[in-house]
Amino acid sequence: MGVLAAPQQLVRQSSTNDGGDIAARLRAWHDEATALCFVYARSLGGLVQSGRGRIAVLNEMALTIDAGGSTLLVMLAGARYDDAPQIFFTPDLGSHFQVAGIGISLGNHDWLFFSPDEVPPTALPGLR
């Protein structure tokens, strides 16, 4: 199993929780096989993949997400990392909520977000 060696571009851009750096949290989620919620969005739209999975492989070049019946390979070259909470909107766009996690802006301008937290029950009324 690979380990994410913190390359020069892995620079903390935001620090909202005072516990450890971003690379250490990614390694811990990988090493502990933590079940994560994830969102992968293409820069020009057209594809948004979301779900639950585990980081199966993690190294300085790439990571793979095992999402049950499928695997998502993500290349990390040129990636920038951010640990600021992300804002998500409810399906009707009438409200929003914040989710803590790690956002990864990829070199190809796509975006990946991981969080060990669940979506708040109030975010999707009637769907739980």
Image (tube, rainbow, N blue to C red):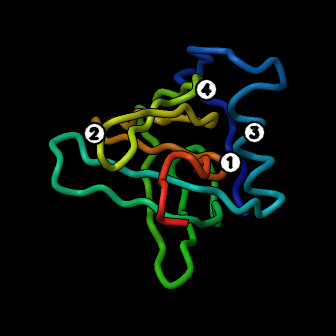
| Badge 1 amino acid | Asp
What number is the disc on residue 108?
2
- Judging by the rendered image, the residue that carries numbered circle 3 is 25
Quarter of the image for the C terminus: give it. bottom right
Choose mark 2 or mark 4, whichever is in front. 4
| Badge 4 amino acid | Asp
Choose mark 3 or mark 2, whichever is in front. 3
Q: Position of residue 109 (x, y in %)?
A: 28, 35
Separation (CA) of disc 4 from disc 1: 14 Å
- Judging by the rendered image, the residue that carries numbered circle 1 is 117
Residue depicted at 44% across the width and 51% down the height: 39
Quarter of the image for the N terminus: give it. bottom right
- Judging by the rendered image, the residue that carries numbered circle 4 is 83
Crowd band around label 2 with a 10 angstrom C-alpha radius: few (<14), some (14–19), many (20+):
few
Query: Do tag 3 and tag 4 residues touch (Cβ < 8 Å)?
Result: yes
- Identify the mark nearer the N-term, 3 or 4: 3
Separation (CA) of disc 1 from disc 2: 27 Å
Choose mark 1 or mark 2, whichever is in front. 1
| Badge 2 amino acid | Asn
Separation (CA) of disc 3 from disc 4: 10 Å
Q: Secondary structure at mark 1?
A: loop
